[in-house]
Amino acid sequence: MLKAWEESTIKQYNSALRLRWNLNIKENSDPFDVSIPKVLKFLTIRYKEGANYGTLNSSGSALAIIATEDIRANDLVKKFFKGSLKTKPNKPRYESTWDVDPVLRKLQEWFPLESLSLKQLSQKLALLLALGTAHRLQTLALIKISNITSSDKGLEIRIPDRVKSLGISSKRPILKLPFFKEKPGLCIAKTLRYYLEVT
């Protein structure tokens, strides 16, 4: 069963279970008593400590593993989670965005490609791929030359490896990079093709 979980999930569950274990030791109660009242008490303590909905949800999932009854199906537990979602929703991952225009202007200045050092070319390609595909670095790190195909319209990159942020049954990403003739200094396909030629 543990093989089905990501390492990050195991760490989250371990953290929640350790907190609950410590609470039981402090209260001199049975750590294996995962009854609904005990679950709600633990979650309420976490809530009062400032835990948001995501943290509480993770704690509930961890407790569900060791519970003998389906705690997620319990009406009181459902109401607790519904209330915590309303009062302590997850915070957005990013509270602000940044202006990409200065970066694009700089990348456009780094042209023609033949005038760039290998370091500049690598930096330009990495930034263009990140900005142009909106994929995470972990996905871009999985790019293999053997999975890049070229046509007169542009390049296509298949990512057959498992991407951590996607579900197991999710389709693997295909990055389609058309030639950007209007602004060749920002053309990802042209930059990648040239990079492959010189490396």
Image (cartoon, rainbow, N blue to C red):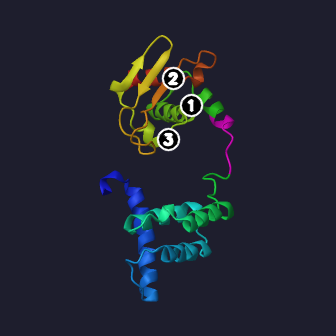
Q: Is residue 43 left or right of residue 8?
A: right
Q: Which residues are magenta?
A: 96-103
The answer for how far apart the CA atoms under marks 2 and 3 are is: 16 Å
The answer for how far apart the CA atoms under marks 2 and 1 are is: 8 Å
Label 2, on which residue?
A: 177
How many marks can you see?
A: 3
Check if residue 56 falls in the magenta segment.
no
Q: What residue is rendered at 39% in x and 64% in y?
A: 65
Q: Say which element carries label 2.
A: strand
Confirm or deny contact between disc 2 and disc 1 (CB under 8 A): yes
Amino acid type of the residue that numbered disc 3 sits on in the rendered structure: Arg
* Image x and y of residue 176, in percent: 50, 24
Label 1, on which residue?
A: 132
Amino acid type of the residue that numbered disc 1 sits on in the rendered structure: Gly
Q: Say which element carries label 1.
A: helix
Looking at the image, residue 198 lies above or below residue 78: above
Which quadrant: the N terminus? bottom left
